[in-house]
Amino acid sequence: MSNFVVNAVARADEGKGASRRLRREGLVPGIVFGGDKRKKPASISVPNNELVKMIEDDAFFSSILTLSLDGKEEQVIIKDLQRHPAKPVVLHADFQRITKSNKIKITVPVVFSGFEKSPASKAACKFAAEKNTVEVLCLPANLPETLVVDLSACDSDQVLHLSDITLPEGVEIVSLRRGGDHDQGIGYVYAPRGSK
């Protein structure tokens, strides 16, 4: 897994004026919350240029991050990120502390593989992915870097669903916990026009 270290500084000033001031100084206002019940939410600031560089790597959003806050390190995940619509600037970042014993909800990339070996591919069909990320629930130790969907057995006109994803032990797909009617499509096989 990628190892991301987010350098942060605790801040006492809060509110819109303080946030604007931080952004002018090239810092992103943020908050870190959760984890051990004794730990209170803490207002922090993170250098914008460092954060922008990290979020260019998609793995940042599905990894356990190390938050270095005033010399102390703790494990966190990114829960929310507000970006400027036009500039490479992060406006606000929310981090959630994690503990070994508490499950986390996090979005993980979905990777489709093996289609070229499938009967559908041999019949000149194509595969279109509809979903490239899935929200999972698991303990931090079980967090997968990606979820792989094996397409090697796909047939023509087949639709794949969330339930077709092979999950590592201890990992659940959040929407499937709500029942079978939440088993959304994640991709489908189709014959290109004029191929029949």
Image: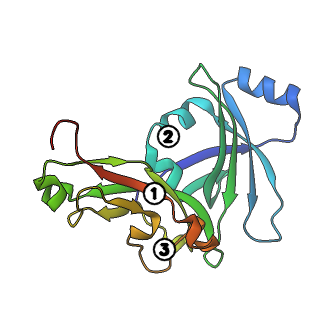
Residue 105's place in the image compared with 167, above or below, is above
Q: Is residue 137 visible?
A: no
Q: Which residue was labeled with disc 1?
A: 185
Labels 2 and 1 touching (C-beta < 8 A): no
Q: Is residue 89 above or below residue 68?
A: above
- Residue drawn 58% across the image and 47% down it: 6
The answer to whether 145 appears left or right of 38 in the picture is left
Residue for badge 3: 142
Direction from residue 107 to residue 57 in the image, left or right: left
Q: Position of residue 19 (x, y in %)?
A: 80, 30
Q: Is residue 130 above or below residue 183?
A: above
Mark 2: secondary structure: helix
Residue 166, image quadrant: bottom left
Identify which amino acid the numbered label 2 is placed on. Met
Question: Which mark is on residue 54?
Answer: 2
Under circle 1, the secondary element is strand
